[in-house]
Image (tube, grey):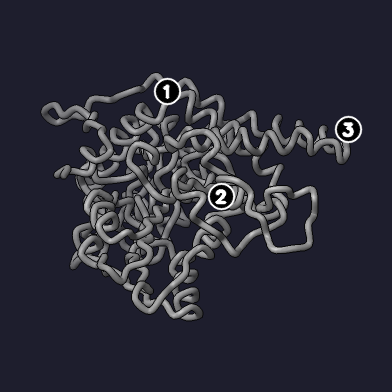
Amino acid sequence: MPAHPDDFWRISDIAVRLPGTLVCVHDDLVRLRANYPILARSSAYLINNSLGAMHRDTRTRLTEYADLWDGDGVGAWDTWFPEMGRVADLVGEVIGAPGGTTILRQSVADALAAVVSCVEFTPARNRVVTTAADWPGTHYLWTEYCRRHGGELVVVPYEADGHSIDASKVAAAIDHRTNVVSVSLVQFRTSALLDLTEIQQAALVHDTLVIVDAYQAAGTLPIDVHSRGIDVCVGGSVKFLCGGPGNGWLYVRPDLLDSLRPSAVGWISHERPFDFEWAEIAYAPRIARFAGGTPNVPAAYAAAPGYQGVLDVGIDRIRRRSQYLTQLLVDGALARGIGVRSPLESSRRGGHVTLDVADAQRVHEMLIERGFIVDFRPGGGIRVGPHFFSTADECVATLDEMVRIRDHH
């Protein structure tokens, strides 16, 4: 069993330490800044963990969508449906999924609801294991589903530090009564990376479905869902994928597809949607059974350039760049007397860093006013999320501005 999360993901810790310095990696990626116009209009756009910078080709692609609608009318569907599949395969490639195993939905909540609708509790197997670090919307969904269907929700709490989850305790909570495990790969508040190794091993012993929320990881961390045998993976496009809102996505392990029967379905979930049969559903083959209703076509057109931009750079290069920039933020914050609520080791973090400064919400507001675009989360602090196109200078300037605000206001 790997002793380290990066062993699990098969990545080395790339940021090279020298006495008193951190060697910069992949600075050549800065040349791609021109593809993301907002970078030229802010002092530092470091909020890619919340809303990734828009690719310049997104505007062109939305015009292409509109031109098809305007020019072809209903005939545009002959182009739109194949394009939805192509874009779904693009995000699949980002997360290491084989073609045809990923589908686009409106949001993570929408995708997750379809998966949850497959779950059938019995008195002997009615437990769902999750953690206190997971996304609130996911907690709402599981809470209501368990309440209405006789389930028991087991929430693994934070450790004593108040912001980390012990993966071994998640694994220990899985037993013969556990039907589903639902966890986040990267915590949205602290950017802590959860090692799935023990969790997957325990789930395998007890024949338990594992659902991984990779929203905060996709686009900045290699996920490799196929090679790692992940059962179900959900995520969205708003963050490091730079794909904008309206594009949740869902991957299901190919050998599980035929055994999962969602009740939250739509007309495109049918194997012959254009027959419009008035009868019990005949499930579409494979991942298409999770398609739901009419797809969000403009969102897919908007997202494709962001996905392609990530693929063009390469997820391993992005991870190495991210480790360098986030370590620069961690070390710089500590040197300036700013608290850090993220793991201090780059190999145990996702793509952002959460900083703890007095009156964090007010400091955040003043940073925004001055063009330093970051975000704030209650119970966490100020989140700073550089991407592959971000610079070390932007990270340092943001820390310096935080100090000026802290010391003078």
From what the image shows, is residue 300 above or below residue 124? above
The kind of residue tagged 1 is Leu
The residue positioned 59% from the left and 52% from the top of the image is: 290
Mark 2 Cα within 10 Å, few/some/many (few <14, many 20+)?
A: many
Mark 3 Cα within 10 Å, few/some/many (few <14, many 20+)?
A: few
Q: How many numbered circles does the render carry?
A: 3
The kind of residue tagged 3 is Gly
Q: Position of residue 127 (x, y in %)?
A: 35, 72
Query: Which of the numbered marks, if any, corresponds to residue 90?
Result: none
Give left or right: position of 245 versus 11. right
Query: Which of the numbered marks, if any, corresponds to residue 71?
Result: 3
The residue positioned 14% from the left and 26% from the top of the image is: 18
The residue positioned 71% from the left and 38% from the top of the image is: 81
Q: Nearer the viewer, mark 1 or mark 3?
A: 3
Q: CA distance from mark 1 to mark 3?
A: 38 Å
Q: Position of residue 202 (x, y in %)?
A: 24, 57
SS for callout 1:
helix
Q: Nearer the viewer, mark 2 or mark 1?
A: 2
CB contact under 8 Å: marks 1 and 3: no
Q: Position of residue 144 (x, y in %)?
A: 49, 76
Residue topped by disc 2? 248
First of labels 2, 1 by sequence position: 1
SS for callout 2:
strand
Residue topped by disc 1? 29
Quadrant housing residue 400: top left
Give left or right: position of 163 versus 73. left
Q: Position of residue 349 (x, y in %)?
A: 28, 45
The kind of residue tagged 2 is Gly
- Between residues 287 and 356, which one lies in front from this camera angle? 287
Give left or right: position of 315 versus 67. left
